[in-house]
Image (cartoon, rainbow, N blue to C red):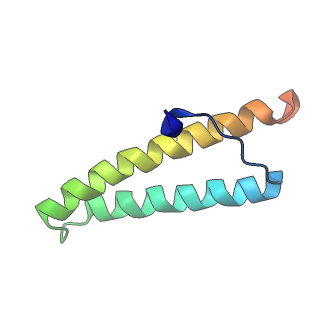
Amino acid sequence: MLNQEMRTVTMSRSDMLRVQQALTHLVIEYQREANDPDTTDDCREIVKRSLAMWENIRNDFKWQMNEQDPEEFRQ
């Protein structure tokens, strides 16, 4: 199935760090919204599902970056 194919995106490490930073920003914003007392219950439920999705994407991206870095630079 096409959506299950593994794909390769070629970019510089500095661009990858910017993508990782953007993913972190998304996660932090969703966490903030989820914890905001003014957030409605419906919105909070949507935010929590979105947060879980973006955390998974960010963690996978971070893992792949770590695997591609030389060993002395790995986290």
Q: Specify whether residue 74 is in view.
A: no
Please tell me in which quadrant of the rendered image residue 35 appears.
Answer: bottom left
Residue 71 shown left or right of residue 31 in the figure:
right
* Residue sitting farthest toward the front: 1
Residue situated furthest top in the rendering = 71
Residue at 28 percent of width and 51 percent of height: 48
Q: Can I make out residue 7 in this image?
A: yes
In the rendered image, residue 65, in percent from the top left (x then y), is placed at 72, 40
Count of numbered marks: 0
11 left or right of 57 in image: right
Q: Quadrant of residue 40?
A: bottom left
Residue 7 quadrant: top right
Residue 37 screen position, x and y as percent = 19, 66
Is 7 in front, or is 51?
A: 7
Where's the C terminus, which quadrant? top right
Residue appearing at x 87%, y 32% in the figure? 70
Above/below status of 1 relative to 38: above
User: Where residue 32 sits: x, y (%)?
Assistant: 35, 63
Task: Tell which residue pokes out farthest to the left in this image.
Answer: 41
The answer to whether residue 60 is left or right of residue 32 is right
Residue 72 x %, y %: 87, 31
- Residue at horizontal 68 percent and vertical 35 percent from the top: 64
Is residue 39 shown left or right of residue 14? left
